[in-house]
Each structure stands twice: as C-alpha cells, then as structure tokens.
Image (cartoon, helix red, strand yellow):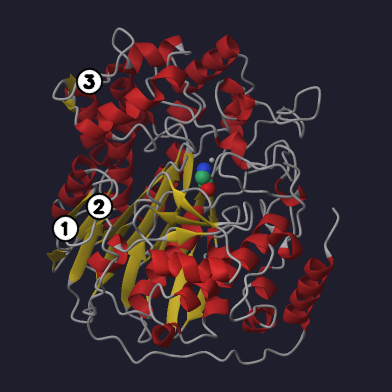
Amino acid sequence: MIESRSARRVRRALVIGLCAAPCAAAAVTPPPLTAQTTRYDFPFDWPFRGRQRPAVTASRGMVVSTSGLASDVGAEILRRGGNAVDAAVATAFALAVVHPEAGNIGGGGFLIARLASGEIAALDFRERAPITATRDMFLDASGAVNKTSLTGHLAAGVPGSVAGLHAAWQRYGSLPWETILGPAIELAERGFLVDERFHRNLAQAKERLLQFPSTVEGFLTSGEPPAIGATFRQRDLAETLRLIAQQGPDAFYRGRIADLIVQEMRRGGGIIRHDDLARYEAKWRDPIVFDYRGYRVLSAPPPSSGGVTLAVILKILEGYDLARLGWHTPESIHLFVEAFRRAFADRNYYLGDPDYVDMPIAGLTSDAYAEELRTTISRNRASNSEDVSRVLPVGEGMHTTHLSVVDSAGNAVALSTTLNSFYGSGVVVAAAGFFLNNEMDDFSARPGAPNQYGLVQGEANAIEPGKRMLSAMTPSVVLDPAGRLFLVAGTPGGGTIITQMAQILTNVIDYRMDLRTAVDAPRFHHQLFPDEIRYERGGLDGLTIGALSSMGHRLRESEEYLGDVNAILILPDGTRLGAADERRGGEAIGA
Ligand code: GLY
C-alpha cells in the first residue's frame, strides 16, 4: 500500500501516540450537567424546524426504536417484569417482522450493555464470510468490483442475529425465551397494518426484489407491495420464529432453518454451507471505553469501526472549545470535518476483524495521538483527503436500525442490527420467510475501491474465509461525570453512523441541547472520500456554506436525510427522556 508524505507524517504521530508519555490535551471541560434545556434555532429551511414531537418522559423504563409496533413489544416486556436485555431482544425480533428493511434474523449486529451494577459488555454478532469465500470473489475479469457483492446469494455473509440475540438473553435475560419471541411470532402470524413507509420502501426496492421468486412470493403480491391499510401476514416467518422459540439457535444453525438456507444458496449460486452455519458464534468482547470532557463513552469494538473511530473524532474535538465556537458555525463545522477526515483515514487503514488483524487501538484512542493529529489541522483551511489518507482510492444506502432500552433498575442496552442495504441481498429464504443480508459488500472487495457507502477501505478489511467484515455500527452508552447513566443512542447510516454519533454526543454535551433538539438537529458528514461535506437538505444556510467553501471545503446536499437516531437521555433525577428520530418516524414508549 502506497502512502502519501503527510500520511506517513500522521502515521509517525500514531507511533508517538503509542509510545510517548501521554501529553495532556487542551481539553475544555464543561460544567456538570443538570438539565438539557438550551434551545437552538435551526436554519429557516430545515424541514423539522418547529415541528418536533416532545421527548417522551418516563420514570421507569423506556424503549425507542424505528417502529412503534416494535417499541410497544419491548415496553410490554418491561411491564411484564423483563429487564432491558429481555426488552431489547424482544424488540429486535419484532423489528425482524415489522421492519424487514433492516430488522432481521438474516443479518447481524452489535450490542452494548451497561448494567445497573456497573458491569459493561459488548456483543459482536456480526456476519462472517463463508469458509469458501475468496479475496477476489467480487472482481470481474478486468479487476473491477461487480454487483454480486450487493444483490443476490453471493452477497450474504453467515447471519449472526439469532446467535447474538440468544447469547444476550442467555447471559442477562430474565423472562423465558419463548416469552421473548412470543410477540414477534404473533405479529408475523396475525399480521399488522401496512403503513405508508412500509409500502413506500418496498415499492422503491421493487425492481431489485422482483429478481427473486421467494421474495416475490413473500413480499410482492402480483408483483406489487401490499397496499397501505392492508393486513400483512408472514406465515413462513412465523413458523421460523416458532422453531427458534422452541429449539433455540440450533433450529437456525443446525436444524430445519439451516437446511432451508443451504437449499436457497444452492438454488441461487450462493456459498453458505451447513458447516458455515454450524460454526457461527456470537462473541462477547470488551467495549471501546473512552472519556470525553469527563463523560465516559462505551461503544462498539472491532469488527465494528464505530467505537474506535468515534473515539478518534471526539478526542481531537476535545481540544477545542466547541461551545464557545458555537453550534454549526463555519469554524466548528470545519473542525468536525477535519476530525472526521483524520479518523476515517485511520479507520480505513487499520481496522478489521480482531481475530484476523492486529490494531493499535490504545494508540489510536489516546489523548497523545489526538494532540498530534490536532497539530495537522489548520483553523481556517481545509486539508486535502489525498494527503491525509493511508489508502489510495482506485476509483452508497444506509440501512441499519438501532434501538435503545433502559429499564426501571437502570440497566441499559444499545442495540444496532443490519442487513446492510434495505432488504439486504434482496433474497428471501424460501419457506423460511426472511431476508438474507448483503454484508459481504462491507469488506474491501478490492482494497482501495469504494463500497456502496463510498468508503475506501484497505487490506485490513480484505475478504478472508470466516472473517467478519468491518462495520460502522456505533451503539453507545454514555455515563455522566458522576458515573451515572446519561445517554443510550445509535443510528443507521453506513459510514455516516459514526459522524452522526459524534454530533449527537456533542449536541448534548457541548451544546447542552435538550434530547429532542439534539436528535432533530440537522447533521453533516465527511468520510475522507469522497472529499466533500455532505449536508442534509435545508440543514445549512447559504452564509455557512459560503464560509466553508472559502476555507476550501467542497459541499454537497444529501439526497436523503442522515440516519435515524433512537435515543434515551437520563436526567440526574432519573427521569428517562426518549426521542425517536423525525427523519424516519419511529417511536419512544415509556413503560
Ligand atoms: N452494514 C453497515 C455497517 O455495518 O456499517
């Protein structure tokens, strides 16, 4: 891998960050937080300006997800005496039924738990490459990446969701497994009313989904999505979930569902075999833990890049007085962008599956390294991504889902799951009723070539048999300076997940926004390549865009809104505030 001169300079800084005595960052620590009340005026054209729903308030439990039906399932589990893990697992299974775009049993995810006892845990149930996967399996004869990493059977990694949800429940759950799955089975069997969003998303994906007869049979009656207001039932999925309820994950990885997956693979030229499924295991790992202005952040470890990259960003930003610079001023946006640029350079170069690659995580997340990186940032000139990158580029969808749960005891769960693209590979497993992911596209199909999110990744994330592909999921739990539970949050959005989370955290910690404002505030994104600031429609005013351009930044209005943050903030008196993102219309439900 060829490195530019300034990339070498920054890499030297990383070595310094690893070896030298820690040097204090010029951190600005805000006063202790008592309430989140500061109000901000959004740009005049921001569509969510002035029409936010208030945050939902509860004194005991709270569930926030992208679907009211699924949040209701989690809240009911809490009311029946279940804890936050029970509720999170039940909500995730419900999302597999009512939100097939991204909720799933054919994909994977990450979970961060922080228990009232202070115990913390991270669960990796990321998909794995099949054993017969090869480094170049998605390259055509000319060496270009073809479309089979995105659509069809080859795109699927070995699913981890069922193993992961079961492992979480097995370690921390309190209600019977069958009770946790019961509501999802009922939603699949008895059906639910199709709303505008469910219909629209299927209609938008129709051409892709029509390629697969089993998908058409399950989701496109006479080639069309079910009508708004119709009752949508999924009998095959209900039977699949019932088998998982009765037999546990063995039904999925060794039993009838494994047979159906392997048969589906044979029909469509896929490569997942029985031994891939039988060998799959979810892994407990240590969360990435770092401090930001006295707040402690617990986030997703590799093979997610989320926690490490978030740490690099926030550690850089900690050296600037963001509150004084102001929210969304050209000066502050510039600093965020420069931090994003550098953090993505590290992400793309260093990070991968910890079972396959060594990563300098302690160095990357150190104060000393952040200080070195800050010396490469001008206060008023944009840097050039080509100079910062360590992976030279040779040449996008945002469809994960996140749920947050807090129970009455103060146990907290942040859980993100994904199929990668909406409806994953587009393939429904015949007679089993669920979509398979297209997570293989999260590998560097060709190191240096952008994936669907435009992320240009390197050798550390090249395809290898059995390896987990790098993720950007950033489910996170934050403790306040007194060590109390403060925030539980996450979002979908490919690479934008990480930069969205940096903005959510700074919105509440630096800018003192109330949770509703923090979630609905317009967001922007930069991920090194393409070298541009992507901003939400109406999210930046003309003066700010002009000032950033004059600093040398390129800007592009995003065609879609960035993400779907589902968050819970806990006030010092224990009140739980829940906010689902207006961008997609989920729901917070108190219990
Ligand atoms: N598939 C999106 C992610 O894991 O980052």
Q: Could you say which disc has been placed on residue 51 in the image?
A: 1
Q: How many labels does the image show?
A: 3
Quadrant of the image occupied by residue 360 = bottom right
Task: Specify which label sits upstream in the sequence, 2 or 3.
Answer: 3
Cα distance between the residues tagged 3 and 1: 34 Å
Residue for point 59% across, 79% down: 380
Q: Is residue 94 above or below residue 152?
A: below
Dot 1: within a 10 Å radius of its alpha carbon, few (fewer than 14), some, or many (20 or more) residues? few
Where is residue 226 drawn, in percent x and y?
24, 19
Q: Is residue 194 above or below residue 488?
A: above
Q: Nearer the viewer, residue 375 or 369?
A: 375
Disc 1 and disc 2: Cα gap in Å? 9 Å
Q: Identify residue type, mark 3.
A: Arg
Rounded to the nearest whole Å, what is the CA distance between mark 2 and mark 3?
27 Å
* Residue hosting label 3: 233
Q: Do the residues labelled 3 and 1 touch (CB within 8 Å)?
A: no
